[in-house]
Image: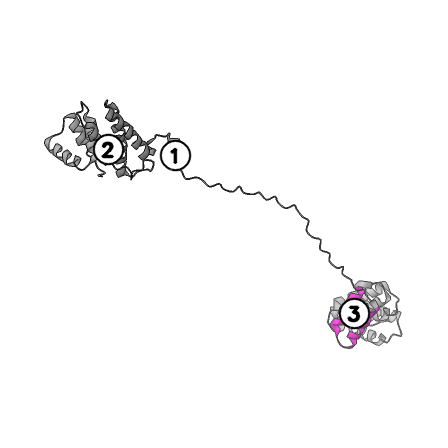
């Protein structure tokens, strides 16, 4: 069936405006198009001659609507054909109803049955109902399950083993320091003497360690100031102690290296006054003569 129908020519023919060329074109088209034949017959109206009912039935039979799906959206070229087919079927039914003969009434019943059987989709539906029926059903989406948060848990308590501090042994430290000094490990000896003074600075053992530390700083490391601090600390704690004489000599030597002659002179004089029989007396007299003291006594 042709998808293009000469609607303008049919309208012009009915209204009496069709020229000769148009009529030739329309007649040629109607010979190959049953729809246009049926439409022209219906739209012309007027009195019908005997046999018109049979003619309409024959034209109706020639219409092939099996391939037309009214419910499916048509392409642009198919829209006119579908609407015209539907209109033709309804027009045929209307014409046959107007026929008064018994035979025509039977034909009306037959046409209505054919329309209902072959074109069930011509029943008009509201747009919203048709839209819902033609839309694809939406699949039910699973409702997300909300997982309750886990309760706050306190971090595990890490128990660290208690550190066992070794008990300081002053006697052992003093022994190791003296041994390191005799073996020539002067730096190790200084480290151990200082540790002993930090741990038990008021003990008699610590005072001996202080004198040994001062001597090492003065003779082995050239630290005259550090040595002087150790000798002064000893004399402050034990001005008459067993090592006081050595502390005075050490103090005088440290002052000599520092160039503090006035304080050095006083230290040598103190040694001669307090310890006249000291083994260091001759050195004290010699040093006093060198720095300008004519009467060391």
Element at badge 3? helix
Near-viewer residue (295 or 285): 285
193 magenta-colored: yes
- The residue where tag 1 is placed is 131
Marks 2 and 3, how far apart at CA: 134 Å
Judge whether residue 98 can be spotted in this image: yes
Residue at x-position 40% and y-position 32%: 129
Residue at x-position 39% and y-position 34%: 131
- The residue where tag 2 is placed is 60
Q: Residue 151: give x, y in percent of width and height.
A: 65, 45
- The residue where tag 3 is placed is 213
Judge whether residue 256 can be spotted in this image: no
View extreme (left): residue: 20
Instruction: Check disc 2: other Cα within 10 Å, few if <14, some if 14-19, many if 20+.
Output: some
Q: Residue 110: give x, y in percent of width and height.
A: 28, 30
Element at badge 1? helix
Near-viewer residue (114 or 34): 114
């Amino acid at each position: 069936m042709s998808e293009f129908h000469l609607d303008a020519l049919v309208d012009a023919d009915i209204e009496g405006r069709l020229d000769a060329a148009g009529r030739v074109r329309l007649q040629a088209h109607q010979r190959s198009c049953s729809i246009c034949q049926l439409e022209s017959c219906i739209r012309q109206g007027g009195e019908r001659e005997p046999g018109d009912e049979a003619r309409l039935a024959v034209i109706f039979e020639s219409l092939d609507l099996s391939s037309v799906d009214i419910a499916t959206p048509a392409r642009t070229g198919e829209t006119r054909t579908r609407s015209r087919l539907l209109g033709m079927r309804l027009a045929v039914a209307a014409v046959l109803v107007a026929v008064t003969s018994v035979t025509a009434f039977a034909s009306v019943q037959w046409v209505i049955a054919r329309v209902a059987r072959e074109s069930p989709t011509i029943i008009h539906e509201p747009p919203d109902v048709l839209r819902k029926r033609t839309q694809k059903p939406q699949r039910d989406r699973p409702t997300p399950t909300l997982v309750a948060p886990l309760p706050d848990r306190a971090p595990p308590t890490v128990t660290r083993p208690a550190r066992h501090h070794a008990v300081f042994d002053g006697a052992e430290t003093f022994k190791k320091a003296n041994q390191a000094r005799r073996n020539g490990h002067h730096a190790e000896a200084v480290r151990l003497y200082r540790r002993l003074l930090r741990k038990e600075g008021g003990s008699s053992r610590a005072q001996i360690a202080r004198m040994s530390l001062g001597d090492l700083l003065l003779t082995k490391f050239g630290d005259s100031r550090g040595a002087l601090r150790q000798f002064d600390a000893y004399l402050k704690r034990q001005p008459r102690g067993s090592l006081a004489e050595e502390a005075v000599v050490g103090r005088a030597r440290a002052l000599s290296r520092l160039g503090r002659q006035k304080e050095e002179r006083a230290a040598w004089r103190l040694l001669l006054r307090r310890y006249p029989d000291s083994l260091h007396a001759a050195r004290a007299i010699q040093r006093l003569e060198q720095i300008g003291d004519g009467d060391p006594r």
